Amino acid sequence: MHTGQLTVGDLSAFILYSGYVALSISGLSNFFTALNQSLGASTRLWELTDRVPAVPLQGLSASAVSQCFRNIFAVLLRRFPDLMNCGSLLAGR
């Protein structure tokens, strides 16, 4: 390039290197987006695990909890009859 002209090879090399730089910047942007999403999701999960239940679970027997779940699934199966194929799975049979 002593003459001040840009050759075809120099131009194509510049275009290729510009594309590599653009792809790298795009990859970094996607990485930081995913990092922020995972940070928000993990924060929400920690909030849920630290939460105190509204219904006290002490003093409830296993049979009472089992009966409660059976009632819930019975209501679901009445409301959504298409779930009947999964009824034995939901009831634990």
Image (cartoon, rainbow, N blue to C red):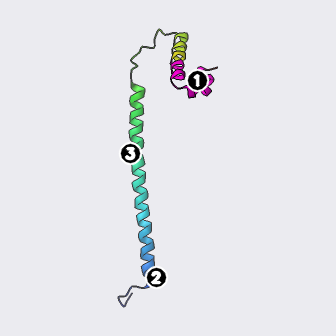
Type of amino acid at the residue the image marks with label 3: Asn
Q: Is the residue 43 above or below the residue 55 in the image?
A: below
Residue 65 versus residue 34: which sits nearer the camera? 65
Q: CA distance from mark 2 to mark 3?
A: 41 Å
Q: Quick check: 40 left or right of 62?
A: left
Residue drawn at x 60%, y 25% is 84
Query: Which is nearer the N-term, disc 1 or disc 3?
Result: 3
Type of amino acid at the residue the image marks with label 2: Gly
Name the residue that disc number 1 marks: 90
Q: Is the residue 5 above or below the residue 27 in the image?
A: below
Residue 76 image offset from top left, x and y in percent? 51, 22
Name the residue that disc number 3 marks: 36
Residue 41 image offset from top left, x and y in percent? 41, 38
Give the quadrant of the N terminus: bottom left
Residue drawn at x 54%, y 22% is 77
Name the residue that disc number 2 marks: 9
Give the quadrant of the C terminus: top right
Q: Quick check: 52 left or right of 87?
A: left
